[in-house]
Amino acid sequence: MAVAMAACSLGLHLAADNTFKAFEKTTLFKPSSIADATKLCYITHKTRLSSSGITIIPRASTVTGTVEDGNQGETDTIPTPIVIIDQDSDPDATVVEITFGDRLGALLDTMNALKDLGLNVVKANVFLDSSGKHNKFSITKADSGRKVEDPELLEAIRLTILNKMIQYHPESSAQLALGAAFGLVAPPEQVDVEIATHITISDDGPHRSLLYVETADRPGLLVDLVKIITDINIAVESGEFDTEGLLAKAKFHVNYKDKALIKPLQQVLVNSLRYFLRRPTTEESSF
């Protein structure tokens, strides 16, 4: 079982063969307003991302997860799912790292789904440490051979991976923000955004600053963060976006006219992000 992603937020549409295709590339770094960055459309119909023929049976407690290489395993403790999108470590490729304890298989179906987004997996490796098995991919755009810079495509990569994780490991649904909308089992508790949100900015040399944002995760968050930053004419050079269970942790190298952000501009950026991340939502019934 897979999940349809938010088409207006990610620039994707559901084709007739039940696969996701990218729309034509659009300009992302000059939104007309912050309001434009917050509009997310959700396709609530649950469908497959591929024709793998695997059926997922909902379980509310400990489950036997079917990994992508066909093996099965059962454990008592469900590890925290982690997806890292790294734009800093490789100048020529976007590096993606996926960890879910020792439950992940070869992730062949995930790599095929990334190819459907117009991407090539140019390198893949696996390593083990105390936190489990880490699957790491180096990804480039198929049409240019360059790393992925488009924030909407980066968010599509992130949600595609999380969707595949829920498809093959339904037990991960209860530990992911995506599970609240599309998973088999929603998280038992919602993250308090007021408590979870932390924003800091520090100088990273004379020509750029380092912005760190930690907050409750949700679909479309990466795109929205980049749009808010660029809406006040701050440039995003590179960064890293980590999904750790229900939390999202982002690091962006930013500058203003090729200079580090001065204190007043830092405060403007922090205030803009806090307002966007912490503001209450308005129910339709209140109109």
Image (cartoon, grey):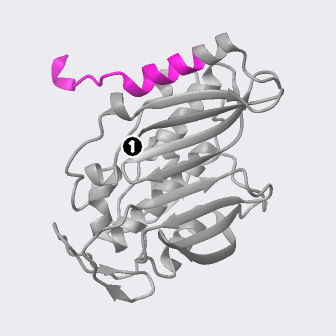
Judge whether residue 33 can be spotted in this image.
no
Q: Which residue is at a point 51% across and 34% down the rendered structure image?
A: 224
Q: Which residue is at a point 80% across and 55% down the rendered structure image?
A: 91
Return the residue nearer the eye: 71 or 161: 71
Quadrant where the C terminus is found in the figure: top left
Q: Which residue is at a point 52% across and 29% down the rendered structure image?
A: 199
Q: Quarter of the image holding residue 282?
A: top left
Side of 111 relative to 148 (left or right): left
Magenta segment, which residues?
268-287
Secondary structure mainly formed by the magenta segment: helix
Q: Position of residue 176 (x, y in %)?
A: 34, 54
Residue 88 in the image: above or below residue 278? below
Quadrant where the N terminus is found in the figure: bottom left
Element carrying mark 1: loop
Residue located beneath label 1 in the image: 218
Return the residue nearer the eye: 82 or 3: 82
Q: Position of residue 245 (x, y in %)?
A: 38, 54
Q: Quarter of the image holding residue 185?
A: bottom left
